[in-house]
Image (cartoon, rainbow, N blue to C red):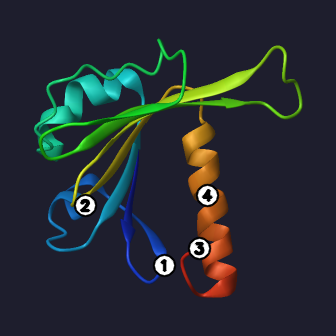
Amino acid sequence: MSYYLLKETVQPCSKAELLDSKGVQYAAILTTPEWERERESFDMGIELDLDARIIHNTKAEVNFDSLTGTFQIPDRENLRENEFCFAFALDEKGIVFIDDSGKAEQMLQSIRRTKHESGTLPA
């Protein structure tokens, strides 16, 4: 589990800090089992089961007050064999990535480095 507050910089935080961060958007990265255990604490009102283990394409679905979806990203090093798959749930408070591959964490760390070097969030 990784938790971040999206302020002037992408700041790592604890789950308690994330849940207490009134008015500050967040990003969280959880595995499928962690999402299954923790999903209610994010209060996103999502009825769908998001499982990063069974993703077949990239898509987004509009829910009553959130977006949910999946990413299927090919591995540029090995297009025929490998792909990175993860799901997401997004509402006005933040985004939760459900990822068993580690790719979402890798991408967020890249954004953190870019943000830290430039001083602004990428557009």
Mark 2 or 4, nearer chain start: 2
Query: Secondary structure beneath disc 2?
Result: helix
* Residue 56 at x, y percent in the picture: 54, 15
Element type where label 4 sits in the image? helix
| Mark 4 neighbour class, 10 Å CA radius: few under 14, some 14 to 19, many 20 or more | few
Reading the image, the residue beneath label 1 is 9
Say how many tags the image has: 4
Closer to the chain start, of discs 2 and 3, is 2
Write down the quadrant of residue 45 in the picture: top left
Does residue 37 sit above or below 111 in this rendering?
above
Q: Position of residue 17 (x, y in %)?
A: 23, 64
Tell me the mark number nearer the camera, choosing from 4 and 3.
3
Which residue is under mark 4? 109
Residue at image mark 2: 18
Residue hosting label 3? 122
Question: What is the three-letter code of the residue carrying label 4?
Answer: Gln
Q: Residues within 10 Å of mark 1 (few under 14, many from 20)?
A: some
User: What residue is shown at x 34% (from left), y 51% (from top)?
Assistant: 95
Q: Is residue 27 above or below residue 42?
A: below
Cα–Cα gap, marks 4 and 1: 12 Å
Residue 27's tag is: none
The residue under the point 61% across, 58% down is: 109
- Amino acid under disc 3: Pro
Q: Nearer the viewer, residue 62 or 83?
A: 62
Query: Badge 2: how crowded within 10 Å, few (<14), some, or many (20+)?
Result: many
